[in-house]
Image (cartoon, rainbow, N blue to C red):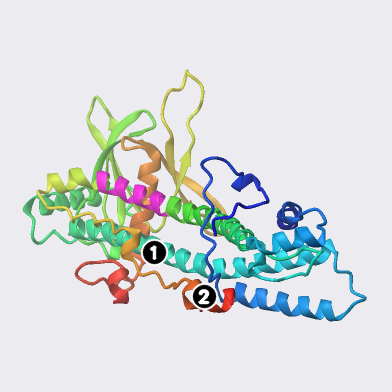
Amino acid sequence: MFSLQVRLFCRSLFIPPLSKDSYAQHNNSTLGVYPAFQFPALPTLDGHFISQIKTLCRENMIISLVKTASDLESYAREYEISCGNVEQLLRPTFEMYKLTPPQLPMPVPLTAYPLDFRAPEGNLVVIELYS
Amino acid sequence: MSSPCFFTHTNFALSSTYRIPDVMPPWGPEVMAALASLEISCENTQADESCDKFSFERSENSVAIIIAAFQKQNDLEQGARLGRKNMQVMDRLAKMLAHKRNSIVKIRDCYARNLLAAKAADDFHAFRLKSSNIGSLSDVMDAATNEVPLIICNVLVGQTAGVCYITHSHVLFNTQLMPILGRNKVSLFSIMDVEVTINTPSKSILNPLPASLSFTTAVFGRKSGTREEVYNFIPSIGARRFAKFIEVLKDVALEDPESLKFSAKGGLIYLAT
Protein backbone atom coordinates (compact mmCIF):
# COMPACT_ATOMS: atom_id res chain seq x y z
CA MET A 1 0.00 0.00 0.00
CA PHE A 2 2.77 2.34 1.02
CA SER A 3 4.99 1.59 -2.00
CA LEU A 4 1.96 1.96 -4.28
CA GLN A 5 1.34 5.44 -2.92
CA VAL A 6 4.97 6.30 -3.47
CA ARG A 7 4.79 5.03 -7.04
CA LEU A 8 1.64 7.02 -7.72
CA PHE A 9 3.28 10.13 -6.41
CA CYS A 10 6.43 9.57 -8.40
CA ARG A 11 4.54 8.90 -11.60
CA SER A 12 2.51 12.02 -11.12
CA LEU A 13 5.66 13.95 -10.46
CA PHE A 14 7.65 13.00 -13.49
CA ILE A 15 7.71 15.37 -16.39
CA PRO A 16 8.82 14.59 -19.95
CA PRO A 17 12.51 15.18 -20.73
CA LEU A 18 13.16 18.86 -21.14
CA SER A 19 15.40 20.75 -23.46
CA LYS A 20 17.83 23.21 -21.91
CA ASP A 21 15.56 26.14 -22.94
CA SER A 22 12.53 24.64 -21.39
CA TYR A 23 14.56 23.85 -18.32
CA ALA A 24 15.39 27.52 -18.02
CA GLN A 25 11.67 28.28 -18.10
CA HIS A 26 10.92 25.60 -15.55
CA ASN A 27 13.68 26.82 -13.36
CA ASN A 28 11.57 29.89 -12.63
CA SER A 29 8.65 27.82 -11.48
CA THR A 30 8.00 26.65 -7.97
CA LEU A 31 9.94 23.53 -8.78
CA GLY A 32 13.05 25.35 -7.86
CA VAL A 33 12.14 25.59 -4.21
CA TYR A 34 14.39 22.83 -3.04
CA PRO A 35 16.99 21.16 -5.27
CA ALA A 36 16.96 17.43 -4.81
CA PHE A 37 18.08 16.20 -8.23
CA GLN A 38 19.60 18.03 -11.16
CA PHE A 39 18.35 18.40 -14.72
CA PRO A 40 17.29 16.39 -16.66
CA ALA A 41 16.46 13.88 -13.98
CA LEU A 42 13.80 14.60 -11.39
CA PRO A 43 14.60 18.26 -10.99
CA THR A 44 13.37 18.92 -7.51
CA LEU A 45 10.93 18.02 -4.80
CA ASP A 46 8.41 20.73 -5.32
CA GLY A 47 6.99 22.60 -2.35
CA HIS A 48 3.45 21.80 -3.45
CA PHE A 49 4.36 18.16 -3.79
CA ILE A 50 5.79 18.02 -0.29
CA SER A 51 2.66 19.76 0.91
CA GLN A 52 0.53 17.08 -0.75
CA ILE A 53 2.63 14.35 0.83
CA LYS A 54 2.09 16.07 4.13
CA THR A 55 -1.67 16.19 3.57
CA LEU A 56 -1.78 12.52 2.59
CA CYS A 57 0.26 11.43 5.60
CA ARG A 58 -1.95 13.54 7.84
CA GLU A 59 -5.09 11.98 6.36
CA ASN A 60 -3.70 8.52 7.03
CA MET A 61 -2.82 9.53 10.57
CA ILE A 62 -6.32 10.91 11.17
CA ILE A 63 -7.97 7.75 9.80
CA SER A 64 -5.84 5.59 12.09
CA LEU A 65 -6.46 7.94 15.02
CA VAL A 66 -10.23 7.94 14.53
CA LYS A 67 -10.31 4.14 14.26
CA THR A 68 -8.41 3.61 17.51
CA ALA A 69 -10.32 6.36 19.30
CA SER A 70 -13.62 4.82 18.13
CA ASP A 71 -12.69 1.51 19.71
CA LEU A 72 -11.91 3.26 22.99
CA GLU A 73 -15.10 5.30 22.75
CA SER A 74 -17.30 2.25 22.12
CA TYR A 75 -15.75 0.49 25.11
CA ALA A 76 -16.39 3.50 27.34
CA ARG A 77 -19.93 3.83 26.01
CA GLU A 78 -20.71 0.18 26.76
CA TYR A 79 -19.50 0.73 30.29
CA GLU A 80 -21.67 3.83 30.62
CA ILE A 81 -24.69 1.92 29.34
CA SER A 82 -24.00 -0.78 31.93
CA CYS A 83 -23.83 1.94 34.58
CA GLY A 84 -27.13 3.34 33.28
CA ASN A 85 -28.71 -0.09 33.68
CA VAL A 86 -27.58 -0.28 37.31
CA GLU A 87 -28.94 3.22 37.83
CA GLN A 88 -32.32 2.18 36.41
CA LEU A 89 -32.41 -0.98 38.52
CA LEU A 90 -31.63 0.87 41.74
CA ARG A 91 -33.91 3.86 41.13
CA PRO A 92 -37.10 2.12 42.44
CA THR A 93 -35.19 1.07 45.57
CA PHE A 94 -34.07 4.64 46.23
CA GLU A 95 -37.68 5.73 45.82
CA MET A 96 -38.94 2.93 48.06
CA TYR A 97 -36.55 3.91 50.88
CA LYS A 98 -37.03 7.63 50.12
CA LEU A 99 -33.30 8.11 49.65
CA THR A 100 -31.59 10.59 47.37
CA PRO A 101 -29.57 8.73 44.73
CA PRO A 102 -26.01 9.87 44.08
CA GLN A 103 -25.70 12.31 41.23
CA LEU A 104 -24.57 10.96 37.89
CA PRO A 105 -21.08 12.20 36.99
CA MET A 106 -21.00 15.15 34.63
CA PRO A 107 -19.39 14.45 31.26
CA VAL A 108 -16.16 16.31 30.63
CA PRO A 109 -15.34 17.21 26.99
CA LEU A 110 -12.18 15.83 25.43
CA THR A 111 -10.74 19.31 25.07
CA ALA A 112 -10.77 19.72 28.84
CA TYR A 113 -7.96 17.18 29.10
CA PRO A 114 -4.38 18.30 28.56
CA LEU A 115 -2.84 17.58 25.15
CA ASP A 116 0.86 16.98 25.61
CA PHE A 117 1.86 17.87 22.08
CA ARG A 118 3.50 20.77 20.31
CA ALA A 119 3.51 20.83 16.52
CA PRO A 120 7.06 20.05 15.34
CA GLU A 121 6.69 22.61 12.57
CA GLY A 122 6.72 25.31 15.20
CA ASN A 123 10.37 24.80 16.04
CA LEU A 124 11.83 25.60 12.62
CA VAL A 125 13.45 28.60 11.01
CA VAL A 126 11.63 29.34 7.77
CA ILE A 127 14.44 31.28 6.16
CA GLU A 128 16.73 28.27 6.01
CA LEU A 129 14.44 26.34 3.70
CA TYR A 130 13.94 29.08 1.17
CA SER A 131 17.43 30.47 1.18
CA MET B 1 3.14 30.42 -4.41
CA SER B 2 0.24 31.00 -6.77
CA SER B 3 1.65 29.00 -9.68
CA PRO B 4 -0.46 26.00 -10.61
CA CYS B 5 0.53 22.56 -9.65
CA PHE B 6 1.60 20.58 -12.73
CA PHE B 7 0.84 17.13 -11.41
CA THR B 8 -2.44 15.71 -10.41
CA HIS B 9 -3.52 13.26 -7.82
CA THR B 10 -6.86 11.69 -7.06
CA ASN B 11 -7.13 13.60 -3.83
CA PHE B 12 -6.06 16.89 -5.33
CA ALA B 13 -7.55 16.89 -8.83
CA LEU B 14 -7.37 20.36 -10.27
CA SER B 15 -10.76 21.98 -10.66
CA SER B 16 -12.33 25.39 -10.52
CA THR B 17 -12.83 25.01 -6.78
CA TYR B 18 -9.36 23.67 -6.16
CA ARG B 19 -7.29 25.71 -3.80
CA ILE B 20 -3.60 25.22 -3.67
CA PRO B 21 -2.79 24.19 -0.13
CA ASP B 22 -0.53 26.20 2.01
CA VAL B 23 2.94 25.10 1.02
CA MET B 24 4.74 27.40 3.33
CA PRO B 25 7.40 25.52 5.21
CA PRO B 26 8.53 24.71 7.88
CA TRP B 27 7.71 21.06 7.45
CA GLY B 28 9.06 19.91 10.78
CA PRO B 29 12.49 18.79 12.00
CA GLU B 30 12.26 15.23 10.67
CA VAL B 31 11.31 16.38 7.17
CA MET B 32 13.93 19.09 7.22
CA ALA B 33 16.53 16.50 8.13
CA ALA B 34 15.28 14.24 5.33
CA LEU B 35 15.44 17.08 2.80
CA ALA B 36 18.93 17.97 3.96
CA SER B 37 20.06 14.36 3.59
CA LEU B 38 18.53 14.29 0.11
CA GLU B 39 20.43 17.41 -0.84
CA ILE B 40 23.69 15.88 0.35
CA SER B 41 23.03 12.67 -1.56
CA CYS B 42 22.19 14.80 -4.62
CA GLU B 43 25.51 16.61 -4.39
CA ASN B 44 27.35 13.32 -4.01
CA THR B 45 25.55 11.99 -7.07
CA GLN B 46 26.63 15.03 -9.06
CA ALA B 47 30.24 14.42 -8.11
CA ASP B 48 29.97 10.79 -9.13
CA GLU B 49 29.63 10.84 -12.94
CA SER B 50 29.15 7.09 -13.19
CA CYS B 51 25.96 7.27 -11.18
CA ASP B 52 22.69 7.02 -13.06
CA LYS B 53 21.07 10.43 -12.70
CA PHE B 54 17.85 9.42 -14.40
CA SER B 55 17.02 6.64 -12.01
CA PHE B 56 13.38 6.35 -11.10
CA GLU B 57 14.47 4.30 -8.17
CA ARG B 58 16.28 7.22 -6.60
CA SER B 59 13.26 9.46 -6.97
CA GLU B 60 11.04 6.84 -5.39
CA ASN B 61 13.49 6.50 -2.55
CA SER B 62 13.63 10.22 -2.01
CA VAL B 63 9.83 10.50 -1.84
CA ALA B 64 9.71 7.49 0.47
CA ILE B 65 12.21 9.20 2.78
CA ILE B 66 10.04 12.32 2.90
CA ILE B 67 6.89 10.27 3.58
CA ALA B 68 8.66 8.36 6.34
CA ALA B 69 9.74 11.64 7.89
CA PHE B 70 6.18 13.00 7.82
CA GLN B 71 4.87 9.76 9.28
CA LYS B 72 7.38 9.93 12.09
CA GLN B 73 6.18 13.43 12.93
CA ASN B 74 2.54 12.40 12.67
CA ASP B 75 3.15 9.45 14.98
CA LEU B 76 4.10 11.89 17.71
CA GLU B 77 0.85 13.79 17.26
CA GLN B 78 -1.18 10.59 17.06
CA GLY B 79 0.42 9.28 20.24
CA ALA B 80 -0.31 12.49 22.10
CA ARG B 81 -3.92 12.65 20.91
CA LEU B 82 -4.53 8.98 21.72
CA GLY B 83 -3.01 9.56 25.12
CA ARG B 84 -5.50 12.36 25.74
CA LYS B 85 -8.41 10.18 24.55
CA ASN B 86 -7.20 7.34 26.72
CA MET B 87 -7.12 9.67 29.70
CA GLN B 88 -10.69 10.76 29.00
CA VAL B 89 -11.88 7.14 28.70
CA MET B 90 -10.08 6.14 31.90
CA ASP B 91 -11.66 9.09 33.64
CA ARG B 92 -15.13 8.14 32.42
CA LEU B 93 -14.69 4.50 33.44
CA ALA B 94 -13.42 5.51 36.88
CA LYS B 95 -16.36 7.86 37.40
CA MET B 96 -18.89 5.24 36.31
CA LEU B 97 -17.28 2.63 38.56
CA ALA B 98 -17.39 5.07 41.46
CA HIS B 99 -21.03 5.91 40.70
CA LYS B 100 -22.05 2.24 40.71
CA ARG B 101 -20.15 1.67 43.90
CA ASN B 102 -21.59 4.76 45.63
CA SER B 103 -25.16 3.82 44.66
CA ILE B 104 -24.80 0.31 46.08
CA VAL B 105 -22.94 1.42 49.20
CA LYS B 106 -25.51 4.14 49.91
CA ILE B 107 -28.35 1.60 50.06
CA ARG B 108 -26.21 -1.04 51.75
CA ASP B 109 -25.20 1.22 54.62
CA CYS B 110 -28.52 2.94 55.27
CA TYR B 111 -29.85 0.40 57.78
CA ALA B 112 -29.16 2.58 60.81
CA ARG B 113 -30.37 5.82 59.23
CA ASN B 114 -33.48 4.84 57.31
CA LEU B 115 -36.57 3.24 58.89
CA LEU B 116 -37.96 1.91 55.62
CA ALA B 117 -34.64 0.29 54.78
CA ALA B 118 -34.37 -1.14 58.28
CA LYS B 119 -37.85 -2.66 57.96
CA ALA B 120 -36.95 -4.20 54.58
CA ALA B 121 -33.73 -5.56 56.06
CA ASP B 122 -35.63 -7.10 58.97
CA ASP B 123 -38.07 -8.75 56.58
CA PHE B 124 -35.15 -10.09 54.59
CA HIS B 125 -33.54 -11.47 57.72
CA ALA B 126 -36.80 -13.17 58.73
CA PHE B 127 -36.99 -14.85 55.33
CA ARG B 128 -33.35 -15.80 55.60
CA LEU B 129 -33.95 -17.68 58.82
CA LYS B 130 -36.65 -19.71 57.07
CA SER B 131 -34.48 -20.64 54.11
CA SER B 132 -34.15 -24.31 53.26
CA ASN B 133 -30.50 -23.93 52.27
CA ILE B 134 -28.90 -21.58 54.75
CA GLY B 135 -25.81 -21.26 52.60
CA SER B 136 -22.17 -21.96 53.35
CA LEU B 137 -20.63 -22.06 56.81
CA SER B 138 -19.33 -18.52 56.47
CA ASP B 139 -22.88 -17.38 55.70
CA VAL B 140 -24.15 -18.97 58.89
CA MET B 141 -21.39 -17.39 60.96
CA ASP B 142 -21.70 -13.97 59.36
CA ALA B 143 -25.47 -13.88 59.27
CA ALA B 144 -25.87 -10.14 59.74
CA THR B 145 -29.27 -8.70 60.49
CA ASN B 146 -28.66 -5.47 58.66
CA GLU B 147 -28.54 -6.62 55.04
CA VAL B 148 -30.68 -4.13 53.18
CA PRO B 149 -32.25 -5.44 49.96
CA LEU B 150 -30.89 -3.58 46.94
CA ILE B 151 -33.41 -4.93 44.46
CA ILE B 152 -36.71 -6.66 44.99
CA CYS B 153 -38.15 -8.22 41.83
CA ASN B 154 -40.53 -10.94 40.76
CA VAL B 155 -39.26 -14.27 39.48
CA LEU B 156 -40.66 -17.36 37.87
CA VAL B 157 -39.14 -20.55 39.25
CA GLY B 158 -40.33 -23.52 37.26
CA GLN B 159 -44.11 -23.18 37.29
CA THR B 160 -44.38 -21.03 40.40
CA ALA B 161 -44.04 -17.31 40.88
CA GLY B 162 -42.05 -15.73 43.64
CA VAL B 163 -40.10 -12.74 44.85
CA CYS B 164 -36.34 -12.32 44.67
CA TYR B 165 -34.39 -10.18 47.14
CA ILE B 166 -30.86 -9.14 46.22
CA THR B 167 -28.61 -7.72 48.90
CA HIS B 168 -24.93 -6.81 48.57
CA SER B 169 -23.93 -10.40 49.38
CA HIS B 170 -26.96 -12.67 49.00
CA VAL B 171 -29.79 -13.58 46.67
CA LEU B 172 -32.95 -14.88 48.31
CA PHE B 173 -35.93 -16.47 46.55
CA ASN B 174 -39.29 -16.66 48.24
CA THR B 175 -41.55 -18.82 46.07
CA GLN B 176 -44.95 -20.33 46.56
CA LEU B 177 -44.53 -24.02 47.18
CA MET B 178 -48.26 -24.78 47.14
CA PRO B 179 -50.28 -21.95 45.62
CA ILE B 180 -53.64 -23.06 47.08
CA LEU B 181 -52.40 -23.80 50.59
CA GLY B 182 -50.08 -20.84 50.59
CA ARG B 183 -46.89 -22.48 51.80
CA ASN B 184 -43.67 -20.84 50.76
CA LYS B 185 -40.20 -22.08 50.00
CA VAL B 186 -37.23 -19.84 50.69
CA SER B 187 -33.85 -20.40 49.02
CA LEU B 188 -30.74 -18.42 49.87
CA PHE B 189 -27.53 -18.15 47.86
CA SER B 190 -24.32 -16.32 48.55
CA ILE B 191 -23.33 -14.18 45.59
CA MET B 192 -19.68 -15.15 45.92
CA ASP B 193 -20.47 -18.88 45.87
CA VAL B 194 -22.53 -19.01 42.70
CA GLU B 195 -21.85 -18.39 39.05
CA VAL B 196 -24.63 -16.94 36.95
CA THR B 197 -25.27 -18.47 33.52
CA ILE B 198 -27.73 -17.06 31.02
CA ASN B 199 -29.78 -19.70 29.21
CA THR B 200 -30.81 -18.38 25.83
CA PRO B 201 -34.56 -18.64 25.20
CA SER B 202 -36.03 -21.16 22.82
CA LYS B 203 -36.91 -19.80 19.39
CA SER B 204 -40.03 -21.92 19.26
CA ILE B 205 -43.34 -20.04 19.34
CA LEU B 206 -44.67 -22.78 21.62
CA ASN B 207 -42.24 -21.63 24.32
CA PRO B 208 -42.51 -17.83 24.45
CA LEU B 209 -40.70 -17.49 27.80
CA PRO B 210 -37.71 -15.14 27.91
CA ALA B 211 -34.14 -16.10 28.79
CA SER B 212 -33.65 -17.79 32.12
CA LEU B 213 -30.78 -17.77 34.57
CA SER B 214 -28.99 -20.62 36.25
CA PHE B 215 -27.01 -20.53 39.46
CA THR B 216 -24.19 -23.03 39.37
CA THR B 217 -21.78 -23.99 42.13
CA ALA B 218 -18.50 -25.87 42.13
CA VAL B 219 -18.82 -29.56 42.92
CA PHE B 220 -16.51 -30.74 45.67
CA GLY B 221 -14.65 -33.97 45.20
CA ARG B 222 -14.60 -33.71 41.44
CA LYS B 223 -11.97 -32.26 39.16
CA SER B 224 -11.82 -28.49 38.97
CA GLY B 225 -14.16 -26.80 36.54
CA THR B 226 -17.04 -29.17 37.21
CA ARG B 227 -20.12 -27.22 38.19
CA GLU B 228 -23.69 -28.18 38.82
CA GLU B 229 -26.87 -26.20 38.46
CA VAL B 230 -28.50 -25.48 41.79
CA TYR B 231 -31.24 -23.06 40.80
CA ASN B 232 -33.02 -21.97 37.64
CA PHE B 233 -35.35 -19.01 37.35
CA ILE B 234 -36.62 -16.23 35.09
CA PRO B 235 -36.31 -12.74 36.61
CA SER B 236 -38.81 -10.04 35.75
CA ILE B 237 -36.05 -7.44 35.27
CA GLY B 238 -34.46 -9.43 32.45
CA ALA B 239 -31.87 -12.19 32.62
CA ARG B 240 -29.05 -10.15 31.16
CA ARG B 241 -29.59 -7.17 33.46
CA PHE B 242 -29.87 -9.47 36.46
CA ALA B 243 -26.61 -11.23 35.57
CA LYS B 244 -24.85 -7.89 34.99
CA PHE B 245 -26.03 -6.62 38.35
CA ILE B 246 -24.70 -9.71 40.11
CA GLU B 247 -21.35 -9.11 38.37
CA VAL B 248 -21.33 -5.53 39.62
CA LEU B 249 -22.06 -6.72 43.17
CA LYS B 250 -19.18 -9.19 42.96
CA ASP B 251 -16.87 -6.44 41.71
CA VAL B 252 -17.90 -4.12 44.53
CA ALA B 253 -17.44 -6.91 47.09
CA LEU B 254 -13.96 -7.77 45.79
CA GLU B 255 -12.51 -4.36 45.04
CA ASP B 256 -10.49 -2.44 47.53
CA PRO B 257 -12.44 0.68 48.61
CA GLU B 258 -9.15 2.58 48.71
CA SER B 259 -8.37 1.78 45.07
CA LEU B 260 -10.55 4.60 43.81
CA LYS B 261 -9.44 7.75 45.47
CA PHE B 262 -11.40 10.65 44.17
CA SER B 263 -11.27 14.27 44.97
CA ALA B 264 -14.43 16.14 45.84
CA LYS B 265 -15.06 16.71 42.13
CA GLY B 266 -14.32 13.09 41.21
CA GLY B 267 -12.42 11.71 38.28
CA LEU B 268 -8.85 11.10 37.25
CA ILE B 269 -8.45 14.47 35.63
CA TYR B 270 -8.50 16.04 39.05
CA LEU B 271 -5.98 13.57 40.36
CA ALA B 272 -3.39 14.71 37.86
CA THR B 273 -3.62 18.32 38.97
Q: Nearer the viewer, residue A62 or B147?
A: A62
Q: Residue furthest top?
A: B206
Q: Quadrant of residue B236?
A: top left
Residue kind at label 1, given as amino acid type: Met
Q: What percent of the width, then of the height, locates residue B65?
A: 70, 69
Main SS class of the magenta portion in the image: helix
Boundaries of the magenta span? A76-88
Q: Which mark is residue A72?
A: none
Query: Which subunit holds the residue at mark 1?
Result: B
- Relative placement, left or right, of B272 versus A2 is left
Measured in 3D between alpha carbons, the distance from the residue under mark 2 to the one under mark 1, in whole angstroms, is 40 Å
- Residue drawn at point x = 51 percent, y = 48 percent: B228
Q: Is residue A11 above or below residue B232?
A: below
- Give the residue at mark 1: B90
Residue kind at label 2, given as amino acid type: Val
Q: Residues within 10 Å of mark 2 (few under 14, many from 20)?
A: some
- Give the residue at mark 2: A126
Q: Nearer the viewer, residue B147 or A105?
A: A105
Q: Is residue B106 above or below residue A97?
A: below
Q: What percent of the width, then of the height, locates residue B189?
A: 35, 51
Tell me the mark number nearer the camera, choosing from 2 and 1.
2
Q: What percent of the width, then of the height, locates residue A34?
A: 66, 70
Q: Residues within 10 Å of mark 1 (few under 14, many from 20)?
A: some
Query: Callout 1: helix, strand or loop?
Result: helix
- Relative placement, left or right, of B83 versus B56 is left
Q: Nearer the viewer, residue B128 or B87?
A: B87
- Relative placement, left or right, of A12 versus A18 is left
- Residue drawn at point x = 22 percent, y = 30 percent: B182
Q: Residue furthest front?
A: A21
